[in-house]
Image: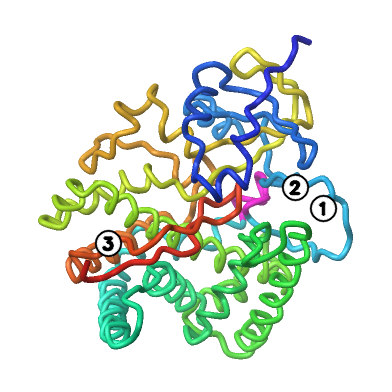
Amino acid sequence: MSERPLADPACFDPDHFAAHGYPHDVWSRMREDQPIAWHDDGIREPFWAITRYADITSIGKDSDSFISSPGVTILRKDQMDQGGAPRVPLMLTMDPPEHHKNRMILRERFKPSVMRALEEHIITRCREIADDVATARIAVAAGASDRIDFVEAIAMRLPLDVILELLGVPTDDRDQMYLWSNAVIGSEDPEYGSVELPRDAILAAQQAMFGYFARFIAERRLSPREDLVSLLVEARIDGEPLSDIEILGFCFLLAIAGNETTRNATSGAMLALIEHPEARAALTADTSTMAPAVEELLRWVTPIVYMARTATRDIDIAGQTVRTGEKVVLFYPSANRDAGMFENPFSLDLSRKPNRHLTFGFGRHSCLGNELARIELRAVLSEILTRFPKLELAGPVSRLRSNFVGGIKHMPIRLDA
């Protein structure tokens, strides 16, 4: 076997992500010189880094050769094979035919026509959020600070409220769900978890969420309603009802995925517009162009860094042999800046068409809630740009220490800069 090209460690370094954001310069060099490269930092599982759009979509189409069930994230070696974690089935780590059977349970509830029926309600919620922010503006004006945290005051509220409403649980618990979600996704960030013991943070939050949702599962078994927990309670796969642990897996995934992607896309999109004032001014002047603008902002931000797959056979990719059992990591932000797919990929073009970005993944595992996320982004950005046209940064942005989610933890803003 020829010598394996080695990936630049910065392509997957959470400290680099926290300090500087995405390493687009590194990914660009890798796309050009070593589109498939071996990464082994001695800390995490080794894997092949895949950075080109064409290779990522090719792997995404081939669910026979590249499977999800061994895990879609790259684990730290000191956290592998430890007991104590509840074995909860997640659709994210299922392969055909189980994945299709589980996806079919939710498909009807998340199809575009159903999501579009929620649009007016989502717009109303955005207006309520903006009203609350306007009230907060009066409060901070009377105090010592004129700053508001965009993430906590705006970006996190809408997606959490919407997914909790769909699940059928109280939106009053939004702040608690936000803390649990942060502990799961930000387990290696010292603010939310532990750099040394991230697994402990994940397990504690996961177990707390399971205990929380178990109550609603029990209630819906006795008295179903028109919500997703009731749908899951009444669902059947091959004629058999879902067990409580299977339903908990759905609730956990929906609560995390329904919040993290849209929250960080909202914060990242607003930051991109602040950093590109001409694009922002044009969009503010004509929010009817919001639909293509959101697609470009999704491409630009790409809040999910990667998904991993495991090879089921020896297979050649871009001149390198991936051996059976080896993992490949699909870097979606890199694919979304690939000049082989996008003209002038490092230019923010809010009218870009076509725009076949991979922000919501690709193939069988593409994000089920992508239409909901698009509607939420269009609604919240339209409202904020209209209500607070002078909104500006009021301090440095704090980024999540994670190589899985490109998260913004805090983004101080002034509404009347």
Query: Going by the picture, which residue comes out furthest to the left?
Result: 285
Residue at 11 percent of width and 55 percent of height = 286
Residue at 61% x, 35% y is 10
Q: Position of residue 91 (x, y in %)?
A: 63, 55
Measure the C-alpha gap from mark 3 to mark 2: 38 Å
Q: Is residue 248 left or right of residue 141?
A: right
The amino acid type, in three-letter code, at marker 3 is Glu
The residue wearing badge 3 is 392
Residue 185 picture quarter:
bottom right
Residue 188 lies in the magenta-colored region: no
Mark 3 vs mark 2: in front: 3
Proximity of marks 1 and 3: CB atoms separated by less than 8 Å: no
Residue under label 2, please give it.
75
Magenta segment, which residues? Answer: 92-101
| Residue bearing the label numbered 1 | 79
Quadrant of the rendered image containing residue 162? bottom left
Q: Nearer the viewer, residue 199 or 369?
A: 199
Q: Which mark is residue 108?
A: none
Quarter occupied by the N terminus: top right
Q: Kindly identify the amino acid type of the residue bearing the numbered disc 1.
A: Gln
Camera-side residue of 335 and 362: 335
Quarter holding the C terminus is bottom left
- How far separated are the C-alphas under marks 1 and 2? 7 Å
**Magenta span: chief secondary structure:** helix
Q: Are dots 3 and 2 in contact, CB under 8 Å?
A: no
Disc 1 on helix, strand or loop?
Answer: helix
